[in-house]
Image (cartoon, rainbow, N blue to C red):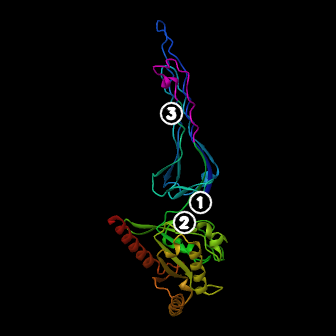
Amino acid sequence: MKFVDEATIRVQAGNGGHGCLSFRREKYVPRGGPDGGDGGAGGSVFLVADSAINTLADFRVQRRYRAESGQPGAGREKTGRSGQDLLVAVPAGTVVRDVDTDEVLGDLAEEGQRLCVALGGRGGLGNTRFKSSINRAPRQTTQGQPGEGRHLLLELKLLADVGLLGLPNAGKSTLIRAVSAARPRVADYPFTTLHPHLGVVRVGAHRSFVMADIPGLIEGAAEGAGLGHRFLRHLQRTHLLLHVLDIAPLDGDPVAHARTVMEELSRYGEGLAERPRWLVLNKCDLLTPEDANRTGEQIVSALAWTGPVYQVSAESGAGTERLCQDVMRLLEASRSTDRSS
């Protein structure tokens, strides 16, 4: 199924039922008085985070969602039945935005989290509510209130621990294939991934993390060039970014390629440039060990890189086990700190 990370939908809450105008009519009970019941409340629309869903593709097919309206009141002071709430399952990690006001209504980041996006209308009052000592036969009722209606933009941000970052053809897809069961398309000719992939990396018993491979960035991505800018949002939830760099590109300079990606991160903002980032020099199998070490040192020196650096070959798997073990240790330390705080 094609990955879809944006969708626009219309939600409509149910209307409240109208109040009833009624008087008690029984034999031998003259002037029985008002007995009109209230209308039922309209159902509300809730979005519910569900980790079993991983794309917004279904919302490209069904775009309108309406909750049930409340029933009108009846005689004998019977209140109308309230409308049933509508629960709409969305992927965990969905950000909900009002299209008309551009207001962010909520961020459904955790399994089972609920967000009311359209409130049902209140039921109207029956004439029983208006009786008093000076108004023994009221003929007033109120109408049920209409339910809220909204146009919503759903934006999916992947819930991944680690994000792969780099230019097209840096080897990100090959790397995630090498360390997980994810199977993004790879080939021996230049092309870029068209939609994100998630892979679970297992490094031992009950020790695993989720890795995300997003489309490669190109210069100007932060301003909308290429595909990568659409998916930079998926890196905002990650704990660690792995900057994958082709150590021996067929065209261009690896230092210039690295600087292009770093510049796009800074332009995009949202704190991505400040996130922990490790440099992964890929395709080291294309060079001799001596040349790979020498080229790696030159790249690190030219970039003034102070963070961790790894040399790997995603194609052969060399160096990937050490990388994944170190990533796991970092994430475990981070999770331990979060629990203690």
Residues in magenta, as a range: 125-147
Front in this rendered view, residue 109 or 37: 37
User: Would you say residue 293 is visible in this rendering?
Assistant: yes
Q: Position of residue 324 (x, y in %)?
A: 44, 75
Reading the chain from its start, which is encountered first: label 3 or label 2?
Answer: 3
Horizontal side of 60 relative to 200 (left or right) equals right
Could you say where residue 286 lies in the image, as x and y percent from the top left? 57, 86
**Kind of residue indicated by mark 3:** Ser
Q: Decide if residue 248 is in sight here.
A: no
Name the kind of residue labelled 1 in the image. Answer: Asp
Q: Is residue 135 magenta?
A: yes
- Residue identifier under label 2: 234
| Mark seen at residue 57 | none
Estimate how packed mark 1 is, as few (under 14), some (14 to 19) or many (20 or more) residues with alpha carbons within 10 Å: many
Q: Tell me where residue 23 appears, x and y as whole percent.
A: 52, 17
Q: In terms of depth relative to the viewer, which is nearer, 227 or 130?
A: 130
* Cα separation between marks 3 and 2: 40 Å
Say which residue label 3 marks.
82
The residue lying at 48 percent from left, 7 percent from top is 27
Main secondary-structure element of the magenta-colored stretch: loop
CA distance for labels 1 and 2:
9 Å
Q: Foreground: 269 or 2?
A: 269
Name above or below for residue 327 compared with residue 128. Answer: below
Which amino acid does the dot numbered 2 rest on? His
* Mark 1 vs 2: CB contact within 8 A: yes
- Residue 10, percent across and down? 62, 47
| Residue under numbered circle 1 | 5
Q: Nearer the viewer, mark 3 or mark 1?
A: 3
| Quadrant housing residue 190 | bottom right
